[in-house]
Amino acid sequence: MKNKYVSSPLFYVGGKEKLMSQIACYLPTDIERLIEPFVGGGSVFMNVEAREYLLNDLNESIIKIHLMLNSYCGREEEFFEKIFSLIRHYGLSFDCNGMSSGLERGGRSSIEIKKFNSAGYYRMRKDFNDGGMQDTMMLYLLLIYGFNRMTRFNKKGEFNLPVGNLDFNDNTFMALNDYFCQSEIKHPQWHNQDFMTFLNGIDYGKNDLVYLDPPYLITSCEYNKMWNEEYERNLIACMNHLDKRGVRFAVSNVIIYRDRRNEIFGKWASQYNIHQIHSNYKNYHDNSKKKIQEVLVTNY
């Protein structure tokens, strides 16, 4: 088992890097293909050993960023030259790898970072929305410098996340290097489909593992808003179908969150193996401890 688990450079809300030491205990050690219909930031594939990796997400922007980063595997120096050039072009702060710009190291509070980067960030966001939407590196920087490091678009298709209080720092630099290393070794195959279409199009083998980390029905994160009971039931139907075909799966979910209970998932999970995962999700507005029951459900 790995002693150190690496983080995704997408810093995805709900990413599993902090829970990998628990999740990994319940994953098989003979995985031929790791199949992820909800890959998100990619922290699971980065930390799980398999011969092949089939990775999917419905979020087109996230897949574009993955593909862009993968295209720089073996050309990391070129990537960092380009991204620092873009950071300097918009006058944004950074502090990593012994280099810094914009703010003194001793005075880098989150409030000061947000204030300093505000004008440059909104100029970059406007340029992206006005015609630079094909610039995926710019999209990645909007994620890094944006609020809670998310990607969000309005109904017109414009990126509309406000400026955040973090910048390009040592954690970002280290996460990118870990990502380049893992992607160069693992050669992941990327897909941008609905999870049912993705899962139904695979010819499964004996030692495949499907790991699912779907949006959680009863939590309130931004990326969970499109998920509803119909999607939850479709997800359960897909997993039952996998089980009937003898395909191994492991699915993360939350059964209890504050005063809410996911009865649909909880009732279904009782027929399989339920493993308790200890977590405490926090967000920008509320970092208090919450009553939460997170689980990993397996059929093996």
Image: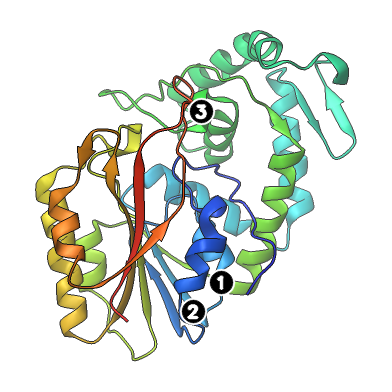
Q: Nearer the viewer, mark 1 or mark 2?
A: 2
Q: Depth check: 263 or 57 in front?
A: 263
- In three-dimensional space, the C-alpha distance between marks 3 and 2, rounded to whole angstroms, equals 31 Å
Q: In the picture shown, does residue 145 fall above or below 60?
A: above
Image quadrant where one finds the N terminus? bottom right
Tell me the element at label 2.
strand
Instruction: Give, as a three-letter code, the residue at label 1.
Output: His
Packing grade of label 1 (10 A; few <14, some 14-19, many >=20) is some
Q: Depth check: 122 or 21 in front?
A: 21
Q: Which circle marks residue 52 in the picture?
A: 2
- In three-dimensional space, the C-alpha distance between marks 3 and 1, rounded to whole angstroms, equals 29 Å
Marks 1 and 2, the one that precedes in the sequence: 2
Q: Is residue 226 visible?
A: no
**Left or right of residue 290: residue 76:** right
Tell me the element at label 1.
loop
Image quadrant where one finds the C terminus? bottom left
Residue linked to disc 1 = 187
Q: Nearer the viewer, mark 3 or mark 2?
A: 3
- In three-dimensional space, the C-alpha distance between marks 1 and 2, rounded to whole angstroms, equals 8 Å
Quadrant of residue 172 in the image? top right
Could you tell me residue 194's position as x and y percent? 23, 56
- Residue at 72 percent across and 17 percent down: it is 91
Could you tell me residue 123's position as x and y percent? 57, 14
Marks 3 and 1, the one that precedes in the sequence: 3
- Residue at 55 percent across and 42 percent down: it is 11
Instruction: Give, as a three-letter code, the residue at label 2.
Output: Glu
Residue linked to disc 3 = 148
Label 1 with label 2: CB-CB less than 8 Å? yes
